[in-house]
Image (spheres, rainbow, N blue to C red):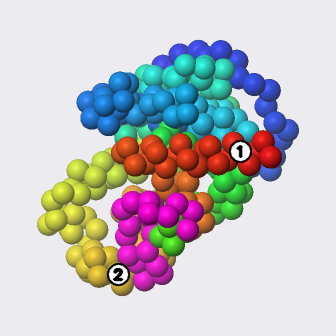
């Protein structure tokens, strides 16, 4: 599958050079039948208004203020006012993995400009984490291990400390209880290698026997009983997908807190207002 990116208006001036630069795919599309988005009167969730502007705008501004970020490709309907914050517009393909694939394809360099052995670093981020800041993103990118797939996770206690009463989905591992982040880091050249296998895993997630066959029954049992360590999990994920995979524990609850219900929207409004007051003080 290929993508034909649409030209966007020039973005703001780039920050100075840094040791490592990451191009970014922003997943701003989604299911047009999402009841949460429909209840808010918009087609897709990132267009939901938060403190007077689409929530995706907070993510785009955080990206543009992050010195490690290079080009930004936005997959989905661009929020009003966001045109100057992106480099490439990519048509929404309606599914997470479909949008990931076309977004990464849009950012890839022509073959004659690629450097053999040098990874094409891409951060994939959802447009529904408006509480994220440039400093948080910078810390994640600067601390990212050298791997084909890096997935940030957040400890439950860090989520509850930052946002008391927040409801997240957690996984209990030997090292603690974690929620997944709403971004991940990849080598763009490896997407075609692991995407078919990832599709297979996601398709099997509601079929226990098929999922056990893919993951391995003993690994699945250890996971369900909280006896699987992060190291064991990332090794197994790497084996399944055929890439070097690493988890990255981050203390930033905003990375693990997407907005998918009214209570989340109310939380984000309070947090952003507090951030605004602090910035003005």
Residue 252, image x, y percentages: 60, 60
Residue at image location 18% in from the left, 57% down from the top: 206
Label 1: few (<14), some or many (≥20) within 10 Å?
Answer: few
- 141 relative to 24, above or below: below
Q: Nearer the viewer, mark 1 or mark 2?
A: 1
Classify the position of the N terminus by image quarter: top left
- 174 relative to 184, above or below: below
Magenta stretch holds residue 135: no
231 on left or right of 82: left
Return the disc, 1 or 2, that comes first in the chain's sequence.
Answer: 2
> Which stretch is magenta?
161-180
Q: Which mark is residue 226?
A: 2
- 228 relative to 127, above or below: below
Residue at image location 62% in from the left, 43% down from the top: 273
Q: Is residue 208 visible?
A: yes
Q: Which mark is residue 6?
A: none
- 22 relative to 152, above or below: above
184 on left or right of 91: right
Q: SS at mark 1?
A: helix
Q: Is residue 125 visible?
A: no
**Residue bearing mark 1:** 277
């Amino acid at each position: 599958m290929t993508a034909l990116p649409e030209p966007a208006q020039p973005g703001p001036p780039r920050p100075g050079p840094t040791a490592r630069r990451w191009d970014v795919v922003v997943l701003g599309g989604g299911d047009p039948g999402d009841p949460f988005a429909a209840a808010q009167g918009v087609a897709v969730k990132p267009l939901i208004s938060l403190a007077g502007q689409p929530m995706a705008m907070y993510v785009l501004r955080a990206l543009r203020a992050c010195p490690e970020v290079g080009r930004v490709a936005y997959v989905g309907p661009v929020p009003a006012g966001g045109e100057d914050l992106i480099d490439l517009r990519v048509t929404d393909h309606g599914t997470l993995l479909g949008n990931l694939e076309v977004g990464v394809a849009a950012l890839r360099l022509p073959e004659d400009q690629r450097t053999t052995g040098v990874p094409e670093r891409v951060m994939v981020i959802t447009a529904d984490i408006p509480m994220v800041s440039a400093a948080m993103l910078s810390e994640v990118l600067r601390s990212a291990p050298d791997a084909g797939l890096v997935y940030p996770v957040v400890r439950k206690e860090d989520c509850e400390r930052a946002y008391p009463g927040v409801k997240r989905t957690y996984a209990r591992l030997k090292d603690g209880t974690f929620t997944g982040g709403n971004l991940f880091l990849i080598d763009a050249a490896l997407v075609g290698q692991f995407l078919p296998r990832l599709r297979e895993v996601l398709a099997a997630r509601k079929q226990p026997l098929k999922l056990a066959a893919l993951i391995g029954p003993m690994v699945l049992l250890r996971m369900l009983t909280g006896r699987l360590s992060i190291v064991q999990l990332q090794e197994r994920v790497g084996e399944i997908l055929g890439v070097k995979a690493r988890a990255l524990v981050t203390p930033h609850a905003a990375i693990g807190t997407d907005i998918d219900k009214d209570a989340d929207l109310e939380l984000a409004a309070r947090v952003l207002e507090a951030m605004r007051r602090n910035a003005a003080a």
